Amino acid sequence: PSQADVLAPDSSEIRELLSMNGGSMVHCTLPPGKQSLAVAHKNIEEIWYCIEGRGQVWRKRGEQESEVDVFPGVCLTIPPQTHFQFRNTDWTPLFFIIVTMPPWPGPQECISVEPHWPSKQA
């Protein structure tokens, strides 16, 4: 779809693609120069596949923490209770295909966490 179906709790644009009992798939967009809010999911797990753009994804789970450069072809996971934040480091939109298992239950699934990158808002 040309228009986002919903704004995710992390502030990215979500276009719903498919959903079944075991999981759902969305197209995620982060505009140029933007970054998401830092969040964690309570119970769901996700697989992200970058299809266009360039950026970084920060993930933290317990004592393990990493930043991953993302560009077309990079695939990563977001396990349950992992803190994460992502940002677009390019002048074009950053696009992911995201598979969520089980399907996204709603915004109550997401909790705010301490950001890795400070807010750019004044």
Image (cartoon, grey):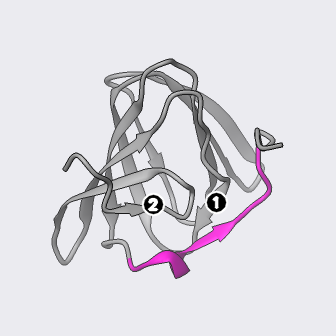
Number of numbered discs visible in the structure rendering: 2
Q: Quadrant of residue 41?
A: bottom right
Residue shown at the point (57%, 22%) measured from the top left: 89
Residue shown at the point (48%, 35%) measured from the top left: 31
Q: Is residue 74 left or right of residue 61?
A: left
Residue shown at the point (63%, 46%) measured from the top left: 85
Q: Secondary structure at mark 1?
A: strand
- What amino acid is found at the position of numbered circle 2 in the picture? Leu
Q: Is residue 43 visible?
A: yes
Q: How many residues crowd mark 1 within 10 Å: few (<14), some (14–19), many (20+)?
A: many
Mark sitting on residue 96: none
Verify whether residue 114 appears in magenta: yes
- What amino acid is found at the position of numbered circle 1 in the picture? Val
User: Relative to 106, does residue 27 appear above or below in the rendering?
Assistant: above
Q: Is residue 81 visible?
A: no
User: Relative to 19, does residue 46 appear above or below in the rendering?
Assistant: above
Q: Is residue 66 left or right of residue 119?
A: left
**Residue named by callout 1:** 39
- Which residue is at the front of the view, 112 or 43? 112
**Residue named by callout 2:** 7
Residue 90 lies, in percent from the top left, at: 52, 19
Q: CA distance from mark 1 to mark 2?
A: 14 Å
Q: Give the label, 1 or 2, closer to the camera.
A: 2
Residue 48 lies, in percent from the top left, at: 38, 44
User: Relative to 13, does residue 68 appear above or below in the rendering?
Assistant: above
Q: Secondary structure at mark 2?
A: strand
Q: State which region is magenta.
A: 105-116
User: Relative to 80, does residue 60 appear above or below in the rendering?
Assistant: above
